[in-house]
Amino acid sequence: MKDLKIEQKRPLSRLEAADQLTALATALREGGEAELDLGSGTLSLRVPDDLHGEMEVEIGNGEIELEIEFKWPTGRKRAAPSPPTAAAQEGVTRKSAPARRGRDGMSADRGKGGKRAAAKK
């Protein structure tokens, strides 16, 4: 099942065909979005850096058919999580260390859970 399919068949002048191809070519060259005029509205497509392309030419029955097809995934790839920094690793170490006691016997760590840790002893 397709998420969305828009198909349009209509006569075009050379200028209209060139305008659509130019909008697509600009998005391919510069990145970003292609704005394609559909007559009844405009379709905006985000064009990624890498895509798959096919070109097909059929000649027969007194006609030439040229199909240019580009495919790319709809979702963005998630970046792999970056390794923790030294500060983040140090923070994990501190959380697992026992709470320090102040002069009053209470936890010197007044952060989240500091009073709870002192009350248990």
Image: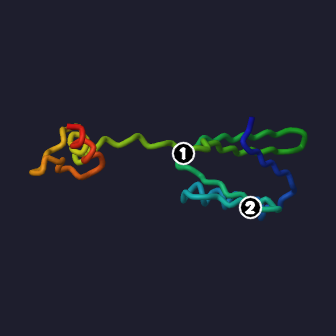
Q: Nearer the viewer, residue 97 or 78?
A: 97
Instruction: Name, please, the residue furthest toward the top.
Output: 1
**In percent of the image, x 27 and y 43: which residue is there?**
116
How packed mark 1 is, by other alpha carbons closer than 10 Å (few <14, some 14-19, many 20 or more), is: few
Q: Nearer the viewer, mark 1 or mark 2?
A: 1
Which is nearer the N-term, disc 1 or disc 2? Answer: 2
In the drawing, what numbered circle is on residue 93? none
Q: Which mark is residue 42?
A: 2
Give the SS element for disc 2: strand
Quadrant the C terminus occupies? top left
Expressed as whole percent of the image width and height from the top left, the position of residue 23 reads 66, 61
User: Can you tell which quarter of the image residue 70 is in?
Assistant: top right
Q: Is residue 116 above or below residue 34?
A: above
Give amino acid for label 1: Arg
Q: Secondary structure at mark 1?
A: loop
Mark linked to residue 76: 1
Q: Tell me the quarter of the image containing the N terminus.
A: top right
Q: Is residue 113 left or right of residue 29?
A: left
Disc 1 to disc 2: CB gap under 8 Å: no
Name the kind of residue labelled 2 in the image: Thr
Q: Position of residue 67 (x, y in %)?
A: 74, 44
Quarter occupied by residue 12: bottom right
